[in-house]
Amino acid sequence: MRWALVKVCLAVTTMVVVAFAVPLGLVVREMARDRAFAGAEREAAAVAPALSITTDRDELERVVAAAGADSGMAVHLPADGARGALDIGASRATGHDIQAVRRLGRASTTTVTGGFALLQPVALGSGAIAVVEVYVPESEVTNGVGTAWAVLAGVGLALIVGSVAVADRLGVRMVRPARRLVEGARELGEGELGARVPEEGPTELRLAAVAFNSMADQVVRLLAGERELAADLSHRLRTPLTVLRLNAASLGAGPAAEQTRAAVAQLEREVDTIIRTAREAKPQTAAPGPGAGCDAAEVVGERMEFWSALAEDEGRTWRVAGVDRPARIPVARAELAAALDALLGNVFRHTPEGTAFAVDVHQGEDAVIVLISDAGPGIPDPEAALARGRGSGTTGSTGLGLDIVRRLAESTGGDVRIGASVLGGSEIRIRFQRDARGPQRRGHRGAVRRRGARRLVPTFNRPRSLP
């Protein structure tokens, strides 16, 4: 905006200067020409009275010398009965030009070597026409024109420079608030909820700053309200959790009872985590700091061990692969465990008992891929399944599970895709980037996705064997 304003002002000022300076320069040149020829006409007029009185050569030579024209004046007398044509002084005009002036009876100018010649007709006492020739050098015609043009050019240049300087200052005054508005919007988009913009500058930008600050305040209020609502709703779960914990404690011994008590304890921890996170100003969904994160292979193994008991109860055949070596990703351990539980819970919830499923972990140079496949009815509309809040339409389905997994993967620069598996059901592919490119870097993340797709995307329909 700043340079655009400077360019516009430069163009407008240049056109104005040219529109006025060129005509003024031409007027100055014409004024100098008129001044030079006016002086020549005065010199010619000084000789006219003498020609009306006498045509004597000696007298006319004295008159010409007295006029002060030196060698710049000549008198051309026509022939009469007593003598022929008489020329007094140094003549530069041609005989043809002199005869033309004498015949027409009016003054004329003609171009001669080194300048111009003014030819002025004068009537003699005998009725004949004499011609007075006054030489006007080129230097007199252009006298002062160069200086005047230089002054005009200097004034025009000064006006252009001054207008550019003023436009630049005005541009800075307009651009600075705009830049602050852009910076404020970027900070707010990156999660800096305290970002505000000074309400200054031109009226339009000041109104924009007022609207931005009002919007930022409204966003803070809405987020605070949502956090409090989430905390209140989570707190309401404490009562049924207490009942579950008491009932689980009375189950006695045995693997199923221990798993039930462990699940209730984990559920209580998750509820406490939700309450604490909801009341924080900046909830964290990814492990901060360099080197932080978890071992995806280890977490997958633990969660499969947890769900294996339920799988055996329902007669499900399952398999886990790729957990024999570490696969670190920049995701908090609890977040990854919650995402895996959401996906495995969907398998148990939306497929009939006895349906087989498998979990595979694949590693590449810059990403880790977790595949969860089943032999169920599949997902008819993957795009709708990934949309937050859509759900499957069945009882107990909120549509948040896959969206939570997607946001967790995208927090590292990865993604989630849904396809068909060789088992006959659905296959959910979760890709985690190892270098944790944030989701706000969308252009760069897109390049990461394409590179990861070329190197690491496994074929959805490759053969598998289940135990």
Image (spheres, rainbow, N blue to C red):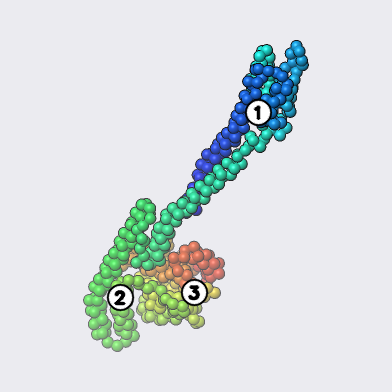
Q: Which is closer to the viewer, label 1 or label 3?
A: 1
238 in relation to 13, above or below: below
How far across and down, in percent of the image, does residue 48 sit?
Answer: 64, 21
Left or right relative to 72: residue 276: left
Question: How many angstroms separate mark 1 from mark 3 (CA)?
Answer: 104 Å
Q: Quadrant of residue 52?
A: top right
Quadrant for residue 358, please give it: bottom left
Kindly state the secondary structure of the residue where label 3 is placed: loop
The structure residue drawn at horizontal position 42% and vertical position 54%, both measured from the top left corner, is 174
Neighbours of disc 3 within 10 Å: few (<14), some (14-19), many (20+): many
Q: Earlier in the sequence, mark 2 or mark 3?
A: 2
List x then y, in percent, for residue 83: 76, 15
Report the Cα–Cα distance between label 2 and label 1. 112 Å
Q: Amino acid at mark 3?
A: Arg
Determine which residue is flagged by label 1. Answer: 67
- Residue designated by label 2: 276
